[in-house]
Image: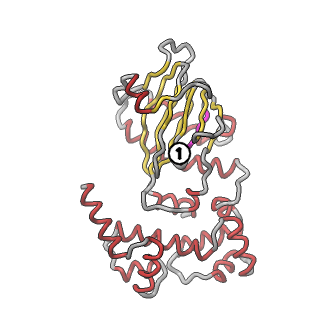
Amino acid sequence: MDVISKILDSLKLSSSFYFDTEFGSPWSVQVPDYQQVARFHYVTRGSCWVRVGEHGTPVQLHSNDFVLIPHGSMHVICNAPDTPAVALDDALAASAYPGQGTWVYGNPDRTNPTNLICGHFQFNENFQHPLIRQLPELLLVRESQALDFSWFTSALKLLTVETQGNNLGQAAIIRHLTEIVFILLIRVWAKSSELPEGFLRAIRDRRIGLSLTAFHNRPGDKWSVAKLADCAGMSRTAYAERFKTLSGISPMRYVTDWRMQCAGQLLRESRLSMELIAEQVGYQSVPAFARIFKLQKGIGPGAYRRAGQFQQSDRN
């Protein structure tokens, strides 16, 4: 399995489809800040503007453009930048939206309406990774870009069809399609953009990418900067400098962070003993593992597991 797939598996991505819309100008909706989600809007007809934050620069969207707000930031989506925004809950109440079907809002004379598909992707609340942290505040794929990736365009078209019907298994198809769209979106962005320095650029780097693949395939091995550098075919010093330049963190900090991410998942989702978990994430003794885990999470692994079990029982 490739590095991105391993990371996204740990992300435990789940999607929620809100609604498809038919907005008549003038209209403007302010979507509130919400942590651990990435909100998306796909324009299926017409055009609109989106602005992230109070002072963000408005960006115009056209038919078949797809925009992702990776960090769940407050944003305004509107027919024009100067249209006064209405809070999302107030707009839903004003239009008496019943919670299903097309959300109709704005001018009742919808001669040239704007149609959107809106929803969000929710991340595992325990997940932390530079791949997600380093995504831009707004990730936009234009129709012209998407045409170069036929599979992305096909997924969006199928998503549009599914939202407009009431067919067998519709909710499940939409949920899985949107999750696929998220992964495809990351791929489109990675291939079509001049990436800034960040973890995704580190993965794309031929030599650093080799070392990351080796590490993610065997995180429990005895890793050092020298061993990572050997996988990359570089000297220890050159490797450490290049890794930090590209990813923003040191190689061994990344190794530790990922191991603790894996350990947390095993503590929450398995019945493995503490000894086996420590061994699987590269520690020969439970005390050494427990010390690093507590430094990272602020709580010991035993207490972390008990807290996870308590939360699970509450959900059940």
* Viewer-side residue, 80 vs 16: 80
Left or right relative to 183: residue 275 = left
Q: Which segment did they paint magenta?
A: 65-69
Is 154 positioned to the left or the right of 311 in the image? Answer: right
Badge 1 density bin: few <14, some 14–19, many ≥20, Cα 10 Å:
many
* Closer to us: 174 or 40: 40
Q: Decide which of 64, 244 is in the foreground and name it.
A: 244
The disc labelled 1 sits on which kind of residue? Ser
Residue 62 in percent (x, y) is at 63, 29
Q: Percent from the top left, x then y, of residue 246?
A: 70, 65
Q: Who's the residue at 61% across and 70% down the image? A: 212
Which residue is depicted at the point 33% across and 79% down?
Answer: 273
Above or below, 252 relative to 1: below
The quarter of the image holding the C terminus is bottom left
Q: Main secondary structure of the magenta part?
A: strand
Residue 29 higher or lower than 175, as above or below: above
Rendering coords of residue 294 (x, y %): 43, 76
Task: State the quadrant of the N terminus.
Answer: bottom right
| Residue 259 shows in the view | yes
Picture quadrant where residue 43 is located: top right
Would you say residue 159 is visible in this rendering?
no
Residue found 47% across the figure and 43% down from its top: 120
Colour scheme in use: secondary structure
Q: Is residue 107 above or below residue 226?
A: above
Magenta highlight on residue 125 = no
Residue to which mark 1 is pinned: 73
Q: Position of residue 74 (x, y in %)?
A: 52, 42
Tell me which residue sits at (63%, 69%) in the image. 249
Secondary structure category for the residue under label 1: loop
